[in-house]
Image (cartoon, rainbow, N blue to C red):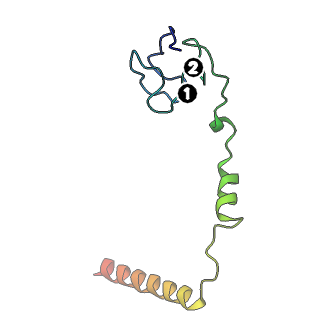
Amino acid sequence: MPSNREAPPVCPNCGADVPRKALACPECGSDHETGWRDFGASSGYDSPEDEFDYDEALKKEFGPEIVPRNVKPIWWITGIVLLVIIAVGLVKSLVR
């Protein structure tokens, strides 16, 4: 049964432009039955950004530590030696 209600110019759910005679949003599929309301009405959806905790998300994704684990001591020593060589080279180039 076709609806005599017009689609809003912008989808209230996803923000996509909606063609004038569209029966549903071309991006998310929302329509009068599944989510469109009168233009300008709130959808009652709370943005997840309001309650998002970045630190908690990092811990959940990567664990409690963001420090590399199981790095063999030879790689730490190699890194330190390279940094010392670079520092000595910079000092020598500045002295000349």
- Count of residue discs: 2
- Of residues 63 and 6, the one drawn nearer to the viewer in this rendering: 6
Task: From the top left corner, tell me how far across and down residue 78 is, in percent.
Answer: 49, 88
* Residue under the image location 66 percent in, 53 percent down: 57
Name the residue furthest left. 96
Looking at the image, is 17 positioned above or below residue 2?
A: below
Q: Position of residue 6 (x, y in %)?
A: 47, 11
Alpha-carbon distance for marks 1 and 2? 8 Å
Closest to the observer: 68 or 47?
Answer: 47
Give the residue displayed 57% in from the left and 19% down from the top: 36
Mark 1 in CB contact with mark 2 (< 8 angstroms)? yes
Would you place residue 16 above or below residue 80 in this image?
above
Q: Which mark is residue 13?
A: 1
Residue occupied by mark 2? 36
Secondary structure state at the residue bearing disc 1: loop
- Amino acid of disc 1: Asn
Q: Residue furthest top?
A: 4
Q: Out of 70 and 13, give the one closest to the viewer.
A: 13
